[in-house]
Amino acid sequence: MNAQNPSIETVNLVRGLIRDVPDWPKPGILFRDITPLIQDPLAFRALIDLFVYRYMRRRLDLIVGIDARGFIFGSALAYALNVGFVPVRKQGKLPSQTVGQSYSLEYGEASVELHADSVKPGQRVLIIDDLVATGGTMLAAIKLLQKLGGNVIEAAAIIDLPELGGSAEIAKTETPFFSICRM
């Protein structure tokens, strides 16, 4: 398996199991549903293995998963790489002292938070989510980790929607970005 360039078979397997749901969560939005992808044991394993091969030599300290679908991939990847997992949650969901960041997304405004003590200065961190659209959530997570002194090695997603500009905005932060498929 080539971690830098996923095989066409893996990309096709992943892409073929992503379901388009029109007009959700509101009219005009085309939601990319990864539920069929994670229900298929072969596809889910291939996806996690691809990320494991990509990051196994990167000396990561933490995987940061973005609420909520990033938790699915981030926790499996953290387990496989034997590193810690940190959740970036929607505002008001964490029980201890937090740091937060507001952002815009394609259908509104939101804020995310993480525990103030979850990342130590200099720790090598990978951020993962299921999809990057406008990039708001991923950019907010990058800013949060930088506030705490984390060294963001890369931001990753299963799906990149380049026409919405998120991956280009991430590139402006000089944070490397990786996705399995562009849709």
Image: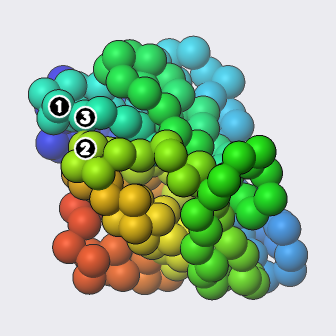
Q: Residue at x 35, y 16 (%)?
A: 82
* Between 152 and 50, the one nearer to me in the picture: 152
Residue where numbered disc 1 is placed: 59
Mark found first going from the N terminus, 3 or 2: 3
- Which element type, helix, strand or loop, lies under badge 2? strand
**Quarter where residue 182 is shown:** bottom left
Circles 2 and 1: CB atoms closer than 8 Å: yes
- Which element type, helix, strand or loop, lies under badge 3? loop
Mark found first going from the N terminus, 2 or 1: 1
Circles 3 and 1: CB atoms closer than 8 Å: yes
Residue where numbered disc 2 is placed: 124
Residue where numbered disc 3 is placed: 60
Q: Residue at x 75, y 63 (%)?
A: 91
Residues under labels 2 and 1: Cα distance?
7 Å
- Residue 34 is left or right of residue 127, and the answer is right
**Quarter where residue 40 is shown:** top right
Residue 104 in the image: above or below residue 140? below
Residues under labels 3 and 1: Cα distance?
4 Å
* Between 68 and 166, the one nearer to me in the picture: 68
Residue 34 in the image: above or below residue 112? above
Residue 75 in the image: above or below residue 105? above
Residues under labels 3 and 2: Cα distance?
5 Å
Residue 85 appears in the picture as rendered: yes
Circles 3 and 2: CB atoms closer than 8 Å: yes
* Between 176 and 110, the one nearer to me in the picture: 110
The local crowd at label 3, few if under 14, some if 14 to 19, many if 20 or more residues have their Cα within 10 Å, is many
